[in-house]
Amino acid sequence: MKFANMREASQNFSNITRLIEEGEEVVLTKNGKPYLLIQKLDGDDLEDYILAKNAKVEEAAKNHQPGPSLDEVKKRFGV
C-alpha cells in the first residue's frame, strides 16, 4: 500500500495509475489524513461493490422473480 498527498497525486497521476495497474493500493491524503483509497477493480468487483453499498439494489436482487423462458414466450405468441 502506497500513500500520496493530493498534490503529489495530481502532479504524478500517471505514476499513481501505473502503481494501481501493478496491483498496489494507493491511499491519498488530504491535510495529512487519509481521504481516498484507490485500487484496481474489475467488473466482478464493481458488481459486488454496488450490491454491498446499495441496499435497494440488493433488495431488488433478492426479490427478483425470473420471467418466462424464451420457449414459453414463443409458445404463447405462436412463434
Image: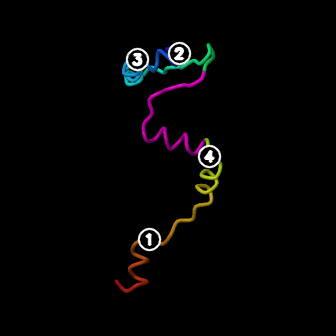
Q: Quadrant of residue 64?
A: bottom right
Question: Which amino acid lies under the numbered mark 2 shown in the image of this protein?
Answer: Asn
Q: CA distance from mark 1 to mark 4?
A: 29 Å
- Look at the numbered discs 1 and 4 and tell me whether their residues touch, using CB distance below 8 Å: no
Is 51 rendered above or below residue 40? below
Which residue lies under the disc numbered 3? 12
| SS type, badge 4 | loop
Which residue lies under the disc numbered 4? 54
The residue at 64%/54% (across/down) is 59
Which residue lies under the disc numbered 1? 69
Q: Answer few, some or many: residues within 10 Å of disc 4's Cα (few below 14, many 20 plus, some between 14 and 19).
A: few
Frontmost of labels 4 and 2 is: 2
The residue at 42%/37% (across/down) is 42
Is 25 rendered above or below residue 43? above
Q: Which residues are magenta?
A: 35-52
- Look at the numbered discs 4 and 3 and tell me whether their residues touch, using CB distance below 8 Å: no
Q: CA distance from mark 2 to mark 1?
A: 53 Å
Frontmost of labels 2 and 1 is: 2
Q: CA distance from mark 4 to mark 3?
A: 32 Å
Question: Which amino acid lies under the numbered mark 1 shown in the image of this protein?
Answer: Ser
Residue 5's disc is: 2
- Look at the numbered discs 2 and 3 and tell me whether their residues touch, using CB distance below 8 Å: no
